[in-house]
Image (spheres, rainbow, N blue to C red):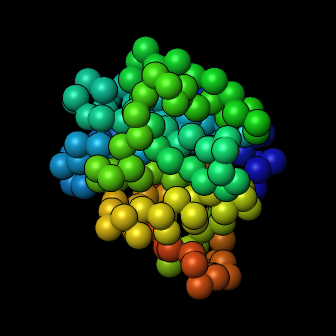
């Protein structure tokens, strides 16, 4: 799946990103949300920048994941604004500088999660590090239950995925295609 994502042409990625942004903008939970955690694309993931631009224009508070350098496997969500200083983490993923921004974990309304694969039951396959699984468990323990949306390309859908007891299914999967 990752190889297929990377093989998409810039034109395919752009068309998919614009279609995805339109679907997200039309969603009732997105429209009602005041705070949304999302990601900056890499490795062929669907690009959320058209949606991000719209969300900022709507006055929504956005957040990006940040891996805690002190606590192994812990990830929190920090505010993301057009002027936020971003730095690559040990995986090369851009994240907000923790000294310039603040975590908004307790106020998240919607969480957009990048997927490697998904099935129609909302089960997902991520990159394998368990960061989102631990973050979702931590949010649940805080009493925070954001709407969980998976983001993928349509070709990343598979017939069925195995599910572990700690796996939390996505409430909906969004793609840039009509699936």
Residue 20 seen in the figure: no
Q: Residue at x 33, y 62 (%)?
A: 144
Q: Position of residue 159 (x, y in %)?
A: 64, 78
Q: Quadrant of residue 171?
A: bottom left
Asked if residue 46 lies left or right of residue 169, the reply is right
Q: Residue at x 53, y 42 (%)?
A: 65
**Residue 96 against residue 105 in the figure, above or below:** above
Q: Nearer the viewer, residue 11 or 151?
A: 151
Q: Residue furthest top?
A: 83
Asked if residue 6 lies left or right of residue 168, the reply is right
Asked if residue 86 lies left or right of residue 49, the reply is right
**Quadrant where the N terminus is found in the figure:** bottom right
Residue 108 seen in the figure: yes
Q: Position of residue 120 (x, y in %)?
A: 52, 75
**Residue 53 against residue 163 in the figure, above or below:** above
Asked if residue 154 lies left or right of residue 36, the reply is right
Q: Position of residue 150 (x, y in %)?
A: 49, 58
Q: Residue furthest front?
A: 70
Q: Residue furthest bottom?
A: 165
Q: Residue at x 25, y 55 (%)?
A: 29
Q: Residue furthest left?
A: 32
Q: Number of numbered discs present? A: 0
Q: Residue at x 45, y 37 (%)?
A: 78
Q: Position of residue 126 (x, y in %)?
A: 66, 60
**Residue 62 against residue 168 in the figure, above or below:** above
């Amino acid at each position: 799946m990752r190889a297929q994502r990377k093989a998409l042409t810039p034109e395919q990625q752009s068309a998919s990103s614009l279609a995805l942004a339109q679907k997200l903008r039309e969603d009732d939970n997105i429209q009602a949300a005041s705070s949304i955690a999302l990601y900056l694309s890499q490795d062929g993931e669907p690009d959320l920048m058209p949606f991000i631009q719209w969300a900022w224009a709507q006055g929504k508070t956005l957040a990006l994941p940040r891996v805690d350098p002190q606590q192994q496997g812990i990830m929190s969500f920090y505010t993301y604004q057009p002027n936020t200083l971003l730095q690559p983490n040990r995986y090369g993923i851009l994240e907000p500088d923790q000294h310039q921004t603040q975590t908004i974990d307790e106020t998240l309304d919607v969480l957009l999660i990048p997927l490697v694969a998904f099935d129609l039951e909302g089960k997902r396959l991520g990159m394998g590090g368990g960061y989102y699984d631990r973050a979702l468990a931590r949010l649940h323990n805080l009493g925070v239950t954001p709407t969980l949306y998976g983001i993928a390309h349509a070709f990343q859908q598979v017939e069925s995925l195995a599910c572990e007891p700690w796996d939390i299914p996505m409430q909906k999967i969004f793609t840039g295609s009509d699936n």
